[in-house]
Structure formats: structure tokens, C-alpha cells
């Protein structure tokens, strides 16, 4: 016998198709004896439910769309792991797409997911207002939850890290070990960058340390070749100035890991010439040269909690209020900061 169907089970047990369907769904309308008989037969003959037909009947696909900036980013891959694992445990599928830090591609991802009939969308936006009008429009018909990049006007559940706290911890660490001439490199147009800078400035103010405005530098993550040149030119110009920095805070994983390689190629000694603290979740931070002092974000937990909020919206599309969750970060000290 090929793939067994509900009709085959009904014929073999001499009951109606409706009885088999209800028994498999554990309906109260069917006696326990009949349920056991149907389930035993189904298991013995390796019955596999037709999820597509079931979903069409229920008017949903049981699939959630997920849009991230870059799956190669360790932090993002850890968030996605949390999302996918949590949804799998609930019998929900995920369809993952990448925006590649491009607002136009992000729009295409949104349209593609809607065309594929997803039941909801989890998104880490390209920037604070990317495709905002479209997201507001979609939200009238689809539940949307934001994760990671949650500094966004969209009224919905949002799950991310305490980036203000992370910026504060990074700066406080450098100040405590006597590194007061600090430069800060951040990703342009990101709400998380503003938050991390806010944390940095909060620590500087608490320790009564001032830094020049031009010690704060923004880069675009879209093109790594341009990014590398911009970081190198900025650091070399600063190191050759009358007041050279002795520390740098890198505001994203891409900036952090690439900066170490850029400095090594340029012969800039870390931490002797300049200490480095970065935001990075890579498990290889300890094996970089030198091992990288990092602010680590609870990526997997962000994915888990974003999943929980999506499930809540699927059950209740109009909650009384939306929740903004910011999970605590952790400072991991290694050799790159000179401590």
C-alpha cells in the first residue's frame, strides 16, 4: 500500500471518513474506544496527516515569515535559531528571508512572504523607518512582531537587547582601566546605534570624561569593502592627530570583527596602541587575534520571546497593550581591551 489516507483508514475500520477525521483530531464527539482503534491503525500503517489540506480548510498556512538583515551575522543566526526551534516545538513552520541591509529588498521580502500566505511576520527592520507605511498597512491583516532593531514607531510587540546598558558597560570597562581617549564607531541609521551611543555617553558623563564630537563615526554596513576603507581611514587619521585615541568601541558585530582584521593589516597594535571593545556574539571571539572583549546579547532568548509574542498575537490580534522587552547584555573581558 502507498501513502495511506483518511479514506483508507475509514474503509479498513468500516467507519465514516468524518469519524476518522474527528478521532485523529481528538474530538469529544468520538468515543475513547474508537479513538484508540483509529490511532492504533494510523500508527501501524504510518499515516501522515495532509497539513496543506488541513491548513487550507482552516484558512491559514501555519507558517511565520522571518526577515533578517544578514543570516551570516552570528547574532542574527542565534536569534533565528531561537525563533525556529521555538516555533518547531509548537508545530509551526518558519520561512526566513534576508534584506541585506537594503530597504528595497526588505520590501520585496515582505511582499513575497505575504504572497506565500504566511500567518504573521517577525522582522528586524533595515532601519528605524524602513517600509514603515507598508508595515502599518500590513498590520491591519497580519500580526507583526519586531525583534533586535526595535526603535521603530510601529505599534506592536518588540523584543531586543538593553543596548543602552550594553553601551554603558563597554564604556565603563574602558574608563575603569584608564582608557579615556575613546572613539566610537557605529552603524548608520540604526536605532540600536543611538541606544548604544546613549549608553556610552551616560558612562562618560558619570565618570566626568568628555570626548570630541568627531570621535563618533558612522559607517554603512551594506558594502563591506567601503566599510573597511572608512574604518581604516578614520582610525589612521585619529591616531595621527594631536590627541590620538587609546580605545575604540565598535557598535556592531560586523564592525567589531572586521576592525580587528583591519588594524592587524595596517600594523596597528591591539591593545598596545588602541584597545578594542565590540558588540559581538560570535563564538570565535576568544580565538581572534587578540581575543575580543565583547558585549554579548542574549540572542537565542530574543528569538524565543519574539516567538512567544507572535503566538500571543495569533491568538489575540488586538491586545490591550503592546510590550517592549529589552533583555540584559553581558560584558566578556578578553585581551583586546588590554585588561
Image (tube, rainbow, N blue to C red):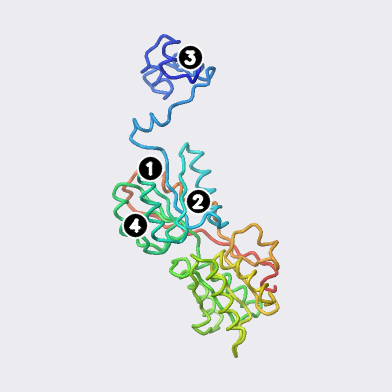
Q: Position of residue 232 (x, y in %)?
A: 59, 76
Residue of label 3 = 37
**Going from the N terminus, do you reach mark 1 or mark 3 first?**
3
Q: Residue 57 location, x and y as percent?
A: 34, 30
Which of marks 1 and 4 precedes in the sequence?
Answer: 1
Left or right position of 283 against 3: right
The residue at 42%/64% (across/down) is 127
Left or right? Give the position of 177 relative to 157: right
Badge 2 crowding class, 10 Å Cα cut-off, few under 14, some 14 to 19, many 20 or more, is many
Q: Which mark is residue 95?
A: none
Whole-angstrom CA distance, mark 4 to mark 1, is: 24 Å
Q: Secondary structure at mark 2?
A: helix
How far apart in space, not on screen, are marks 2 and 4 (Cα)? 19 Å
- Residue farthest to the front, as pictured: 225
Q: Which residue is mark 1?
A: 116
Of the two numbered discs 2 and 3 on the same chain, state the one appearing first in sequence: 3
Q: How many marks?
A: 4
Query: Dividing the image into 4 quarters, which one contains the C terminus?
Result: bottom right
Task: Please report whichever mark, 4 or 3, sits nearer to the chain's N-terminal start.
Answer: 3
Whole-percent x and y of residue 120? 38, 46
Task: Tell me the CA gap for discs 1 and 3.
Answer: 37 Å
With respect to residue 208, does 49 lie above or below?
A: above
Cα distance, mark 4 to mark 3? 49 Å
Q: In what element is the residue under mark 1? A: loop
- Residue at image mark 2: 303
- Residue carrying label 4: 155
Q: Nearer the viewer, mark 1 or mark 3?
A: 1
Q: Residue at x 59, y 74 (%)?
A: 172
Q: Nearer the viewer, residue 133 or 89?
A: 133
Amino acid at each position: 500500500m502507498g501513502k495511506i489516507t483518511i479514506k483508507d483508514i475509514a474503509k479498513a475500520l468500516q467507519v465514516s471518513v468524518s469519524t476518522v477525521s474527528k478521532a485523529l483530531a481528538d474530538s469529544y464527539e468520538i468515543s475513547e474506544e474508537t479513538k484508540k482503534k483509529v490511532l492504533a491503525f494510523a500508527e501501524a500503517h504510518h499515516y501522515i496527516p495532509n497539513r496543506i489540506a488541513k491548513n487550507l480548510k482552516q484558512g491559514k498556512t501555519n507558517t511565520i515569515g522571518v526577515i533578517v538583515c544578514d543570516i551570516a551575522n552570528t547574532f542574527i543566526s542565534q536569534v533565528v535559531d531561537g525563533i525556529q526551534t521555538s516555533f518547531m516545538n509548537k508545530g509551526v513552520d518558519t520561512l526566513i528571508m534576508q534584506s541585506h541591509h537594503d530597504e528595497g529588498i526588505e520590501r520585496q521580502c515582505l511582499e513575497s512572504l505575504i504572497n506565500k500566505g504566511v500567518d504573521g511576520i517577525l522582522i528586524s527592520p533595515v532601519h528605524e523607518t524602513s517600509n514603515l507605511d507598508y508595515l502599518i498597512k500590513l498590520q491591519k491583516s497580519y500580526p507583526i512582531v519586531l525583534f533586535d532593531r526595535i526603535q521603530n514607531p510601529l505599534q506592536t510587540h518588540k523584543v531586543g537587547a538593553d543596548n543602552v546598558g550594553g553601551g554603558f558597560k563597554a564604556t565603563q570597562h574602558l574608563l575603569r582601566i584608564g582608557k579615556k581617549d575613546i572613539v566610537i564607531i557605529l552603524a548608520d541609521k540604526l536605532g540600536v546605534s543611538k541606544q548604544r551611543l546613549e549608553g556610552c555617553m551616560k558612562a562618560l558623563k558619570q565618570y566626568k570624561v568628555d570626548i570630541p564630537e568627531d570621535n563618533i563615526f558612522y559607517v554603512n554596513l551594506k558594502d563591506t569593502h567601503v566599510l573597511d576603507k572608512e574604518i581604516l581611514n578614520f582610525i589612521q587619521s585619529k591616531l595621527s592627530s594631536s590627541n590620538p585615541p587609546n580605545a575604540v568601541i565598535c557598535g556592531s558585530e560586523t564592525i567589531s570583527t572586521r576592525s580587528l582584521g583591519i588594524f592587524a593589516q595596517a600594523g596597528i597594535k591591539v591593545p598596545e596602541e588602541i584597545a578594542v571593545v565590540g558588540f559581538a556574539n560570535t563564538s570565535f571571539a576568544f580565538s581572534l587575534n587578540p581575543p575580543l572583549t565583547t558585549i554579548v546579547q542574549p540572542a537565542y532568548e530574543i528569538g524565543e520571546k519574539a516567538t512567544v509574542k507572535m503566538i500571543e498575537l495569533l491568538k489575540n490580534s488586538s491586545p490591550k497593550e503592546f510590550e517592549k522587552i529589552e533583555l540584559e547584555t553581558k560584558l566578556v573581558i578578553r585581551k583586546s581591551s588590554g585588561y
